[in-house]
Image: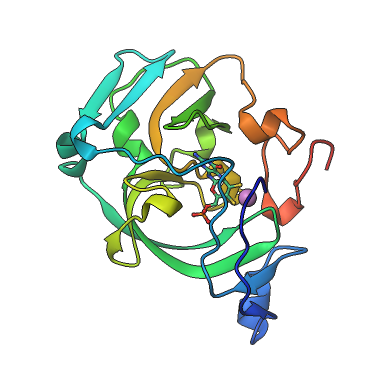
Amino acid sequence: MGSGFLSRGFRGRPRDPEEAARLPPGQYLTRDFPVLSAGPTPRSATARWDFVVAGAAEPTRRWTWDEFRALPSETITVDIHCVTKWSKLDTVWEGVSVDTLLDGVETSAQHLVAHCDGGYTTNVPLADVTGGKAWVAFAYGGEPLDPEHGGPARLLVPHLYFWKSAKWVRGLELVDPDRPGFWESLGYHNYGDPWREQRYAGD
Ligand SMILES: Nc1nc2c(c(=O)[nH]1)N[C@H]1C(S)=C(S)[C@@H](COP(=O)(O)O)O[C@H]1N2
Ligand SMILES: [Mo]
């Protein structure tokens, strides 16, 4: 999507039935980690970084980088699926569960919009980022997250197409009603379930 550069390399078919069963319809396997960004990579110094939970949230929350990194985190091993049709199996991340970030926050909203450095947004139902389904990830493959892949921190919502995994994420805005984000306003599917091949609005 966007001006993304898709590196040449392994474009694989599943090696065995177990891998095949993990590949959503229309996807192929890659061992590279393609970079797909709609604009330039923002460089955000962690000294000035903060993360906020706001909107229809009571109370609102804010963490500095050090406070965020002091929150309990976990290692997450998941398959990821980009709407441009690559999938990558068993990616290993470290991050803070969105459950932890929303702990103690009262809301009547059922949706949220993730906000990023650079202005990118994406919307997700609250139910899709709670219950151990989403993280704010700060490491990939045991290393701090590369800026190109969203460092210092990105949203990770692996069960939806990867455009929902907002890079350089800085906050979650609880919204009611739902409000489409960047790609969702440009004709991509509002929800983006790779298993139902929800690539575009109307799919
Ligand atoms: N802030 C921001 N987040 C973003 C994007 C973007 O352009 N800006 N692109 C999305 C898309 S379309 C995809 S497929 C993934 C790509 O992540 P990657 O570059 O780490 O592979 O990031 C998503 N998150
Ligand atoms: Mo994408």
Residue extending farthest to the right is: 202
Query: Residue 58: x, y in percent?
Result: 33, 13
Q: Which residue is drawn at 44% across and 38% down?
A: 130
- Position of 78 with respect to 86 (left or right) is left
Residue 66's image quarter? top left
Residue 60, position as x, y percentages in the image: 31, 16
* x, y percent for residue 9: 61, 77
The image shows residue 74, relative to residue 187, as above or below, that is: below
Residue pictured at 62% horizontal, 53% vertical: 4
On the rendered image, what quadrant is the C terminus found in?
A: top right
- Residue 52 drawn above or below residue 150: above
**Is residue 100 shown left or right of residue 81?**
left
- Report the residue that reaches farthest toward the front: 40
Colour scheme: rainbow
Give residue 94's quadrant in the image.
bottom left
In the image, is residue 57 above or below residue 113? above
Query: On the picture, is 46 further left or further right than 130?
Result: left
Residue 150: x and y in percent read 42, 47
Which of 109/41 is in front?
Answer: 41
